[in-house]
């Protein structure tokens, strides 16, 4: 065996080798087909040997996805050890396996009748339908090493929750309510999601982040309640009923409750303050406590969109009118990939985020001054056919604008932001009926402040996950596509047909850019967007699927 | 069992017979794991990636074009999963993983072509071929698979690390001959 082959195999298996030699070997690998063939033969054989002598893996997530209840007996066991659990134990001891991230490693899907269902990522065949808007109030967003209490029905990430009491034996669960509140619960804990506005902590540790939009939300403990908006606080309840509260942000109100559950006394709390409330006397005392005594926030794991390198090729082949990749910004301006078309201006802290080789547009906070704005107008063929395509990831479940097309206001008009089109995320609306946590697509012709036709997605979205979204008009229909599948559509009315193009500006991350006093008129988006494209025609179904698959790396490179 | 046409199985799954997907996993599981093990270092990572590939296949089976090579489609998805795996922030801090990522990009097409003939039956026959190796070569192969470092193997066999790699290379030549004879 020649020395170069030995050396590259040694480097391959982790033996130390200096950088110059490594570069030399890589260069030969690129240029010498015979050398490459010899190397491939070696690593291919190595791969076969490792695979054939290892135990057959237990693919729990695959089994759960497909709904296999019992494994078919192996027709030929002679090649695999029976010690599947031994292999899993070894793997778990070395590092945590994704397959066992949910404690018992089994995620059950429960029937609609007891209030649980699935979101996108479980796809078809889940066996459970979506919860109707009047039943679900929350979704399970993240689970870490979770084991549910005995007798408790296991919930998976993405499961919808109707009001219910929950016992968490161990681990950390993140639950997003449809009013934008995020709960972090650390087991062992006994708590209840009583309604969209009330969570009760009977025992254990709970932490709540309450946005300003969640008016009226409260966390209750034995004889106490914490209320306010735009705050973050944690509550621990011990076995003897003592409640301890720590405030991380804002100035919530602490209510001491009487036997009827009404406020007896109200105590304002300050940021970083910690108090203890005795169970019988209901006496409030300042407590010396550290943040470590309360539920920690999960370690944030920013998720890059991680789109395949060929994605842009597919988008360009569809000939967009405007295409912003958000790879870089120069003086708060992101260039349009299509020459001669307007750039996207970044305002109020919106920035390009870089993670490894990935770049996306980050909306870091719900600051009302935060948005992106197209530097010019688009004569959008809203009355005939068009499409808007984007990848998005939301930090939470809340009413938030992704993209708005705003027409030129008439001189002197009261409404300076007449909307022609809107793509937004919803939480739980008090004005519209739809699947909680759905995405909304609105077309409004002529542009204005009210009316129009809506199409909602049939399923909700989960925070911290990337979605490929296309909102388009096809003749007299609106179509809403998510991850390559049509997820919502609506038929348009006669008034929404026009041959005239509508000059519009594209706004990202905010409903209106004129100063607004009401939070509902801002609908700030907190999260990431990537690869935004607009077209002067609707995309074909095959194109949408191709784009999604290209982004996920399932398509062969476009030649 | 007689190997059924892959397209028939796909049709069954798409018609609603989810259990039929088990047949695809059985047919392609071992060659897929071999393909992944050729590229990533840890077996657990290869198995994690294999599960991801099958999940992706199951969710997108309707997009598979009739008449095309299912194994090639599977490997294409696997190649992308491997590249994404290497691109993760954690991986990129490890020099060996960075090197592997570059190598996989260079040899990807060759490895794909070379793996196209791999079948579950062929890979399984490898164990029988290992048992037929001369003692010294079999020892080197087994020790490597057990996770022993080349340095330790060299010390036990009273030879050099380079010699251990050479022995493994010779063993692989014999294994390839054995496989081609077994296939006939």
Image: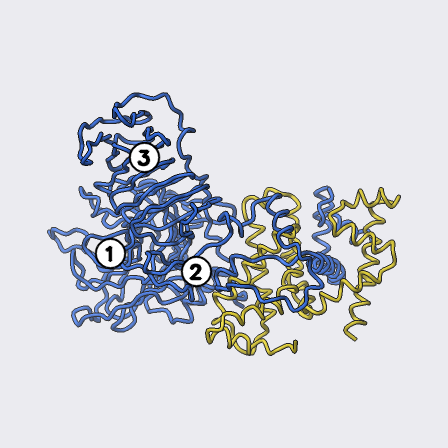
Chain colours: A blue, B yellow
Question: How many numbered circles are shown?
Answer: 3
- Identify the residue under disc 3: A232
Residue B133's image quarter? bottom right
- Identify the residue under disc 1: A134
First of labels 1, 2 by sequence position: 2
Label 3 chain ID: A
The percent coordinates of residue A33 (x first, y second) are 73, 62
- Residue A446 numbered mark, or none: none
- Identify the residue under disc 2: A122
B84 or B178: nearer the viewer: B178
Badge 1 marks a residue whose secondary structure is loop
Badge 3 marks a residue whose secondary structure is strand
A35 or A425: nearer the viewer: A425
First of labels 3, 2 by sequence position: 2
**1 or 2: mark nearer the eye:** 1
Q: Is residue A284 above or below residue A121?
A: above
Gap in Å between the C-alphas at discs 3 and 2?
32 Å
**3 or 1: mark nearer the eye:** 1
Label 1 chain ID: A
Look at the image and tell me whether residue A303 can be seen.
yes
Label 2 chain ID: A
**Mark 2 neighbour class, 10 Å CA radius: few under 14, some 14 to 19, many 20 or more:** some
Gap in Å between the C-alphas at discs 1 and 2?
23 Å
Q: Are marks 3 and 2 on the same chain?
A: yes
Identified at 62% across, 43% down, the residue is A94
Q: Is residue A78 above or below residue B86?
A: below
Left or right of A482: which side holds A516?
left
Gap in Å between the C-alphas at discs 3 and 1?
27 Å
Look at the image and tell me whether residue A339 can be seen.
no
Question: Which quadrant: the N terminus of chain A?
Answer: bottom right
Left or right of A174: which side holds B56?
right
């Amino acid at each position: 065996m020649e020395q170069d082959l030995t050396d590259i195999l040694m480097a391959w298996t982790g033996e130390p080798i200096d950088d110059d030699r490594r570069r030399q070997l890589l260069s030969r690998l690129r240029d010498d087909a015979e050398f490459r063939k010899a190397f491939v033969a070696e690593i291919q054989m190595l791969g076969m040997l490792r695979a054939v002598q290892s135990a057959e893996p237990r693919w729990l997530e695959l089994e759960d996805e497909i709904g296999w209840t019992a494994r078919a007996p192996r027709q030929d066991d002679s090649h695999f050890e029976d010690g599947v659990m031994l292999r899993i134990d070894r793997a778990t001891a070395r590092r945590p396996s994704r397959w066992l991230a949910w404690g018992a490693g089994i995620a059950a899907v429960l029937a609609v009748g007891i209030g649980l269902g699935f979101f996108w990522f479980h796809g078809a065949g889940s066996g459970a339908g979506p919860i109707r808007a009047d039943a679900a109030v929350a979704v399970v967003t993240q689970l870490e090493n979770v084991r549910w209490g005995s007798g408790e029905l296991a919930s998976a990430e993405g499961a919808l929750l109707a009001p219910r009491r929950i016992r968490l034996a161990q681990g950390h669960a993140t639950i997003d309510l449809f009013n934008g509140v995020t709960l972090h619960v650390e087991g062992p804990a006994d708590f209840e999601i009583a309604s969209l506005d009330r969570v009760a902590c009977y025992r254990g540790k709970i932490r709540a982040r309450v946005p300003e939009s969640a008016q009226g939300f409260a966390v209750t403990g034995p004889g106490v309640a914490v209320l306010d908006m735009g705050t973050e606080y944690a509550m621990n309840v011990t076995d003897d009923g003592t409640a301890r509260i720590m405030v991380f942000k804002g100035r919530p109100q602490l209510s001491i409750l009487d036997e009827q559950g009404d406020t007896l006394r109200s105590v304002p709390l300050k940021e970083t303050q910690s108090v203890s409330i005795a169970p019988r006397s209901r006496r409030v005392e300042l407590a010396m406590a550290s943040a470590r005594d309360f539920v920690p926030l999960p370690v944030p794991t920013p998720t890059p969109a991680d789109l395949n390198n060929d994605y842009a090729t597919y988008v360009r082949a569809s000939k967009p009118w405007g295409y912003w990749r958000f790879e870089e910004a120069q003086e708060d301006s992101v260039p349009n990939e299509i020459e001669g078309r307007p750039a996207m201006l970044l305002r109020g802290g919106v920035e390009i985020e870089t993670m490894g080789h990935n770049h996306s547009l980050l909306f870091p906070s719900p600051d009302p001054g935060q948005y992106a704005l197209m530097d010019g107008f688009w004569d959008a063929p809203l009355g005939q056919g068009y499409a808007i395509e984007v990848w998005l990831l939301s930090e939470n479940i809340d009413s938030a604008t992704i993209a708005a097309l705003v027409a030129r206001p008439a001189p002197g008009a009261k409404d300076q932001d007449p909307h022609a089109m809107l793509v937004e995320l919803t939480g739980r609306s008090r004005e519209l009926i739809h699947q909680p946590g759905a995405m909304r697509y609105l077309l409004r012709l002529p542009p204005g402040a009210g009316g129009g036709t809506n199409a909602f997605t049939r399923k909700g979205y989960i925070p911290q996950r990337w979605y490929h979204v296309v909102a388009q008009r096809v003749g007299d229909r609106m179509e809403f596509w998510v991850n390559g599948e049509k997820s919502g559509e609506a038929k348009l009315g006669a008034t929404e047909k026009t041959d005239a193009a509508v000059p519009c500006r594209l706004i990202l991350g905010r409903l209106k850019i004129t100063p607004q006093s009401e939070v509902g008129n801002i609908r700030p988006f907190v999260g990431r967007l990537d690869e935004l494209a607009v077209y002067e025609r609707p995309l074909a179904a095959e194109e949408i699927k191709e784009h999604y698959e290209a982004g996920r790396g399932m398509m062969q490179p476009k030649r | 069992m007689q190997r059924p046409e892959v397209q028939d199985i796909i049709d069954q799954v798409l018609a609603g017979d989810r259990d039929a997907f088990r047949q695809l996993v059985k047919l392609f599981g071992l060659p897929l794991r071999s393909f992944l093990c050729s590229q990533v270092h840890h077996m657990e990572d290869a198995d994690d990636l294999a599960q991801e590939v099958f999940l992706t296949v199951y969710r997108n089976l309707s997009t598979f074009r009739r008449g095309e090579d299912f194994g090639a489609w599977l490997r294409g998805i696997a190649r992308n999963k491997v590249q994404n795996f290497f691109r993760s922030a954690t991986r990129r801090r490890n020099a060996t993983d960075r090197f592997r990522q570059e190598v996989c990009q260079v040899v990807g097409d060759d490895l794909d072509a070379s793996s196209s003939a791999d079948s579950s039956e062929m890979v399984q026959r490898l164990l029988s071929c290992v048992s037929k190796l001369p003692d010294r070569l079999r020892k080197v192969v087994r020790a490597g698979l057990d996770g022993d470092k080349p340095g330790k193997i060299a010390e036990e066999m009273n030879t050099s690390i380079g010699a251990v790699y050479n022995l493994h290379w010779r063993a692989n030549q014999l294994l390839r001959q054995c496989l081609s004879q077994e296939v006939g």
